Amino acid sequence: MSERKAFEVTPKEVEFSRWFDEVIFKAEILDERYPVKGMYVWLPYGYQLMENIMNVMERLLRETGHRRVYFPGVVPESVLGREFRFIKGFEDSIFWITALGRKKIQERLALRPTSEAIMYEVLKRWITSYKDLPLRIYQIVPVYRYETKATRPMLRVREIVFFKEGHTFHATYEDAVKQVDLEVEIYKKFYDELLVPYIVVKTPPWDTFPGAKYNYDIVTIMPDGKALELGSAINFGDLFAKTYDLVYMDQNGEKRYVNTTSFGISERSLAAMISIHGDNRGLKIPPKLAPIQVVIVPIPTKGYEDKVNEFSKSLHERLSSRFRVVLDDEDERPGFKFYRWEMKGVPARIEVGREETEKQFVTVARRDTGERVKINLSELEEELEKLFEDIEDTMKKQAENYFNERVYHAESIEEVKEHVTQKMVSFPWCGLDECGHEVEEEAGYGLLGYEEGYYEGSGKKCIVCGREAKHRAWIARSY
RNA sequence: GGGGCCGUGGUCUAGCUUGGUAGGAUGCCGGCCUUGGGAGCCGGAGGUCCCGGGUUCAAAUCCCGGCGGCCCCA
């Protein structure tokens, strides 16, 4: 009945969540069998992939003047506690340390759920003058949130392992506004490199991060039609600074509150990449991000084993200086290896058998289309580079089609209700809370946010009140 | 938050209703043979039946609690 082959998975279109779980296990991204709910083991291949992704992010951050730091993972309650007043039920989502050794603790310690509190506490000693601003720092660390809802690998976890949290500090509100715009630009470039399609929305006032002036969310859509938040950029204004007494002295010798922002992403970025590009054979990884870009599979016909092996080895050596390449010389059937490396999403596979050895060429199979091409040895590197570019273009187009198939631009509440169970739906909105709430109530789901001023001057009407529409709002079922 | 299903070698599972020797497939190890899309044959290892308690002469099986996983609805 369920006598499935090693690399066979539940079809994506049949049951997406099962497909996702099986693929991330069989592609050796995560071992989900860790005995604590909502926590998972990152396997070498998955870890490497996530590192490659984070390297893209770090490059973008360095280029824009952000510097990496490390703040400890444990925060005293007295420091974290000041944040509580902003967030309902915040305390219940914290992992608390209540004992040290056999002694009960005097002041509870928290595993960081995010690092604003502890950073601000320390930074008020770093920042004294306008000359200390702007300050842009980030760290990539695990954070802990006691999720009470059903947990899902990478999507809803209790330990976010790759949490990139950026925190910035500015003299004026205007500077903070510019910074948040920069953060959005960074995220756009990041997800463009991951070939993950997205929308950028401002969250509605009633759903804005507590304590924030406003925030932007990057949102994508998963194969099952549910929206997934991939990152956010938050402008706190001087609100957090007031709470933590973060002040600086301006040119006139007057004390002013610092304006702050923060922006975060996590391994959800990988979850989106896997979900959007993967198929029923497994992962498809963009060549630039692939831990292994090329796998060489020898096909040793009887009597030619030595020649084939020799050829494979020389290829491996030759390509290693330019690509991330693996020679799979395990004693398994070629077909079995093909399935294994397809599951792992390796973009290109080089097949080397008797024919290639004799005529001095290679057969290259590409993961994205399954197509095979013959490449002359003399132009191997150049052709591989071209192939990778072509794979990237193809994947990008596929992602665009994927995205367009899953969004719908509604012109009425009826259309919203009709499509919201399947797709991510946009609609013209006047911007009034009551109209937003009306759509939420009718649709049964919350607004994701809106693209500010998208319909300004277009003549479009709000689908609720009929007044002139200002924004393009988005609504969907979500994770 | 509400409802439902489930937990048996690494993986997938049979057995549970009606208590009595844990069985298969796959994977793994050794050998032979082979290799252009998941081969085959021979031999072998691998189990706290999720954990704890209860009922019983006897529990994978029945009852209670916990832990873990999944699905549907808000």
Image (cartoon, rainbow, N blue to C red):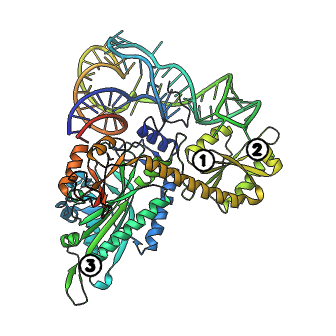
| Amino acid type shown at disc 3 | Thr
Q: Is residue A27 above or below residue A66?
A: above
- The amino acid type found where label 2 is placed reads Gly
Question: Separation of disc 1 and disc 3 at Cα?
Answer: 50 Å
User: Within the image, what quadrant is residue A392 found in?
Assistant: bottom right
Q: Chain of mark 1?
A: A
**Nearest the camera: A407 or A156?**
A407
Secondary structure, mark 1, is loop
Q: Residue at x 41, y 40 (%)?
A: A17
Residue A132, percent across and down? 32, 82
Residue nearest the observer in this picture, A214 or A150: A214
| Image coords of residue A147 (percent x, y) | 28, 48
Residue position for label 3 = A172
- Label 1, on which residue? A367
A463 versus A114 height, above or below:
above
Instruction: Please state if A344 lies on the left or on the right of A365 as rendered.
Output: left
User: What residue is pinned by disc 2?
Assistant: A353
Residue under the point 34% across and 67% down: A71
- Check disc 2: other Cα within 10 Å, few if <14, some if 14-19, many if 20+: many
Q: Would residue A312 be visible to someone looking at this image?
A: yes
